[in-house]
Each structure stands twice: as structure tokens, then as C-alpha cells.
Image: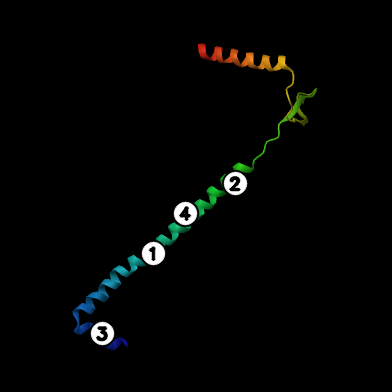
Amino acid sequence: MEKSEVRQVLATNPYAAGRTEATERYGRLAKNAAKWQGITYFMLLCCAACVYAVIHMASTVTKVPYMVQVNRHGYYVAVAPIKPGRIDDQSLIETIINRYREDIKKNGEK
């Protein structure tokens, strides 16, 4: 249909004229809503990617404890990494447990 034919149909049919007017009026709103929905989905995707990145970084952090000493100038110097060891001495185990009990009693009195 050419523009002149469309104008004739609109002039003779009030329903077609009303539909055209409604499409012109509310079509822009529908397009804007679709655009904002697309932006919203994109932002949700970005948030999900950021959450994944933070969780991944938090799970890959490893701390290596080091034994340090203070040199004669007052600066801390790393000596060596601390390796997990075994406690074989029974008196040392009893001492650690007794200190733990004493700490609980002291903190319970406050």
C-alpha cells in the first residue's frame, strides 16, 4: 500500500485510525520498556560475573606464615616459612590444654 492508499483507509475507517494513533502513542513506550529490560538483564549478568570473580579470588588466597626476627636496626626480616609440625611431647600437650582452661576461666569471670 502506498501512503495515499493508507490515508484513504484511515479516513474511511475510524478503527484503523484509532489503532494507528495508539501505535504511534504507545509504541515508543513499548520500545523503551524493551530497551530497559535488555539493560537490566545485562546488568544482572555483570553482577553475576562480579560475584563469581569475588568468590573465585577469595577461594584462591593462600597465606604462608613466616618466622620473622627483628634486626639490629629495628626492621622485621623474614627468616623462613613455618611448616606444620607434630607435637609428640605429652607434657607440652598438657601445658597447652591447661593454658586453654585457664583462659576460659579468666574470660568467664569478666
What residue is disc 2 on? 56
Q: Is residue 97 left or right of residue 50?
A: right
- The residue located at (74%, 18%) in the rendering is 89
Q: Which image quadrant is residue 91 in?
A: top right
* 62 with respect to 81 (left or right): left
Q: What element does badge 3 sit on?
A: helix
| Amino acid carrying mark 4 in the image | Leu
Q: Secondary structure at mark 4?
A: helix
Callout 2: SS: helix
Measure the C-alpha gap from mark 3 to mark 1.
30 Å
The answer to whether the residue labelled 4 contacts the one labelled 3, judged by CB atoms less than 8 Å apart, is: no
Give how far apart the Cα atoms at labels 2 and 4 are: 18 Å
Which residue is disc 1 drawn over?
34
Q: How many residues crowd mark 1 within 10 Å: few (<14), some (14–19), many (20+)?
A: few
Q: Residue at x 20, y 82 (%)?
A: 13
N-terminal of the two: label 3 or label 2?
3
Three-letter residue code for mark 2:
His
Q: Residue at x 23, y 79 (%)?
A: 16
Tell me, for residue 7, which label it has, or none: 3
Between disc 4 and disc 3, the foreground one is: 4
Reading the image, the residue beneath label 4 is 44
Q: What distance separates the C-alpha of mark 3 from that of mark 2?
A: 62 Å
Determine contact: label 3, label 2, CB under 8 Å: no
